Image (cartoon, rainbow, N blue to C red):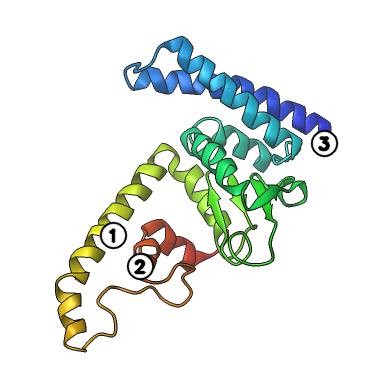
Amino acid sequence: MASWVKGLLTVLICSLLAPGFLALLNLIFGAPVDYWVALLVGGIFGLAYGLEAGILTIYALDTFKGWVCLLADMTWSLPNTIFGFVFGNIVYLFFGVPSRANSAGQCWISYRARGSSGFGVSTLQVLGTVNIGGAGQHERMHLLQTRAFGPLYLPIFAANYVVNFLIQVVWTFTVGGLLWLLKVRTKPYFSPPSRSVVSGFFGWIYYANLFELWAYASGNP
């Protein structure tokens, strides 16, 4: 299948499925917004996402996997796709540029970092289906997690961060702080292992997230 055909199909499917599924979600949750508003928002998103994904030909629509990823991203995992498209493109534009070489047929929009170090080079990230820096050790596992957990992924991820933050704060200012004052511990807070890309106080909060533990343990699928 020619690249332009894959791109055109991607735009058409996203433009049709996104508004339809968003309207369905709106109905399931008791129609908090007007039906036509849901369709309009879904249509704008579907067209915008479809154009970016289509130009980069991220979905290999001559393969079964490509179709599964596209359909999942526009239905079950649509909230993650919207989240990643909005916030990923806003943040990553400051650090890199969309790369067709890194995105074509990979079922994600991947940014290539402008610099030679730092975010996008030594620290990689994926939000929904938008990535910066490539697969790394486990970024594609996060991509699989979003598609597997669908609309549950972001709430679970956020709730886990809140719980970890509370545990870290309570420990630091109680037992951990006391042990640190008594010089039993070198730090009053929980520290992540050395392989964590985030260190310090917030490192354990990040690393102890269930999705991160899973990803670090398994690597890319």
Answer above or below: position of 54 versus 102: above
Residue 104 percent coordinates (x, y): 74, 45
Q: Is residue 203 left or right of residue 92?
A: left
Q: Quadrant of residue 44?
A: top right
- Name the amino acid type tagged 3: Ser
Alpha-carbon span between mark 1 and mark 3: 45 Å
**Relative vertical location of residue 45 with respect to residue 180 in this rendering, above or below:** above
Q: Residues within 10 Å of mark 1 (few under 14, many from 20)?
A: some
| Residue corresponding to mark 1 | 164
**Disc number at residue 204?**
2
Q: Is residue 5 left or right of residue 108?
A: right
Looking at the image, is mark 3 or mark 2 earlier in the sequence? 3
Q: Which residue is nearer to you in this view: 87 or 79?
A: 87
Q: Amino acid at mark 1?
A: Asn
- Work out whether mark 1 precedes mark 3 in sequence or the reverse, and give the earlier one: 3
Q: Nearer the viewer, mark 1 or mark 3?
A: 1
Q: Are marks 2 and 1 in contact (CB under 8 Å)?
A: yes
CB within 8 Å, label 1 to label 3: no
**Contact? badges 3 and 2 (CB < 8 Å):** no
* Point 41% across, 37% down: residue: 151
Give the structural element (helix, strand or loop) at label 1. Answer: helix
Percent of width and height locating residue 119? 58, 61
Crowd class of label 2 (few under 14; some 14 to 19; many from 20; radius 10 Å): many
Which of 89 and 35 lies nearest the eye of the viewer?
89
- Residue linked to disc 3: 3
Looking at the rendered structure, the secondary structure element under dot 2 is helix
